[in-house]
């Protein structure tokens, strides 16, 4: 059963930004999700605390000031399979109801990337999910979702394995996002603004070189 009941928003509920959202990118950007860690069963002041999948824990209005900064996420089988990194469940969900949602879109790729750890990890399941979504289910790695390109997000997370996987499955470095930036241009801007250091910075540099090489091949 869903933990959401009426106006209650209890701990354990999956949420995303809601109609009153005013907190910039605390959630990691549009489409990202988190989990309520202190809900209405603990707080009676109209506020709840959310831990975001991309990192960070903050308080948000759930009724306070007549505002709702977050809202529950429908726990559909497709999103659950991606969250659990379960390829078999993903294929089953696509067969049952999610194929049309995936084909020709990039939103599901951004879901995978939002949950992927940053830096040089051995995320075999992440790579496998990307491959299945593009090669078998028809997700489009060159179509922006929420203005963002999957290739850009993978690069900004320092995931060279996912950058390579996307390139191997047809992602093009010369495609522009909603701001008119290629993935290389977006990553360059990200590096100028980033406070990353150490191992993550090294991986961001490797991703930059991958994108530079790909752009040269596409010329």
Image (cartoon, rainbow, N blue to C red):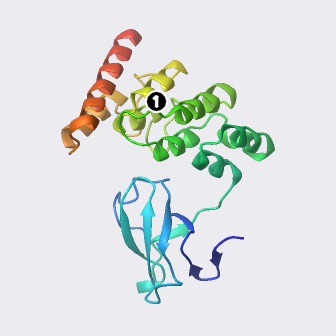
Expressed as whole percent of the image width and height from the top left, the position of residue 55 reads: 38, 56
Image quadrant in which the N terminus is located: bottom right
Q: How crowded is mark 1: few (under 14 residues within 10 Å), some or many (20 or more)?
A: many
Marks counted in the figure total: 1
Which residue is painted at 51% across and 19% down in the image? 168
In the displayed structure, would residue 84 be above or below residue 140?
below
In the displayed structure, would residue 61 be above or below residue 182?
below
**In this picture, residue 199 sits left or right of residue 33:** left
Comparing 107 with 27, the one in front is 27
Q: Can residue 203 be seen in this view?
A: yes
Expressed as whole percent of the image width and height from the top left, the position of residue 39 reads: 50, 78
Quadrant of the rendered image containing residue 195: top left
Quadrant of the rendered image containing residue 13: bottom right
**In this picture, residue 41 sits left or right of residue 147:** right
Expressed as whole percent of the image width and height from the top left, the position of residue 115 reads: 48, 47
Comparing 180 with 71, the one in front is 71
Which residue is painted at 50% across and 26% down in the image? 166
Expressed as whole percent of the image width and height from the top left, the position of residue 179 reads: 36, 39
Which residue is painted at 68% across and 32% down in the image? 137
Which residue, as the protein is rendered here, is positioned at the far right?
A: 96
Image quadrant in which the C terminus is located: top left
Which residue is painted at 35% across and 65% down in the image? 23
SS at badge 1: helix
Which residue, as the protein is rendered here, is positioned at the far bottom?
A: 44
Which residue, as the protein is rendered here, is positioned at the far front?
A: 122
In the displayed structure, would residue 7 be above or below residue 123?
below
Q: Can residue 17 be seen in this view?
A: no
In the displayed structure, would residue 48 be above or below residue 25?
below
Q: Name the residue under label 1.
A: 162
Quadrant of the rendered image containing residue 205: top left
Comparing 209 with 63, the one in front is 209
């Amino acid at each position: 059963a869903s933990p959401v009941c009426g106006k209650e928003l209890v701990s354990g509920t999956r949420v995303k930004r809601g109609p009153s959202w005013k907190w910039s990118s605390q959630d990691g950007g549009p489409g990202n999700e988190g989990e309520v860690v202190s809900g209405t069963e603990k707080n009676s002041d109209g506020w709840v605390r959310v831990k975001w999948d991309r990192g960070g824990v903050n308080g948000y209005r759930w009724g306070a000031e007549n505002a709702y900064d977050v809202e529950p996420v429908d726990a559909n089988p497709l999103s659950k399979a991606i969250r659990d990194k379960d390829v078999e469940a993903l294929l089953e969900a696509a067969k049952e109801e999610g194929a049309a949602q995936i084909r020709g879109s990039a939103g599901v790729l951004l879901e995978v990337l939002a949950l992927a750890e940053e830096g040089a990890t051995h995320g075999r399941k992440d790579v496998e999910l990307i491959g299945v979504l593009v090669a078998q289910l028809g997700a489009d790695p060159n179509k922006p979702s929420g203005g963002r390109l999957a290739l850009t997000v993978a690069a900004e997370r320092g995931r060279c394995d996912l950058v390579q996987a996307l390139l191997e499955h047809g992602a093009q470095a010369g495609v522009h996002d909603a701001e008119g930036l290629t993935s290389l241009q977006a990553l360059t801007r990200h590096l100028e603004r980033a406070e990353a250091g150490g191992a993550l910075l090294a991986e961001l540099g490797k991703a930059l070189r991958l994108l530079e090489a790909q752009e040269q091949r596409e010329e």
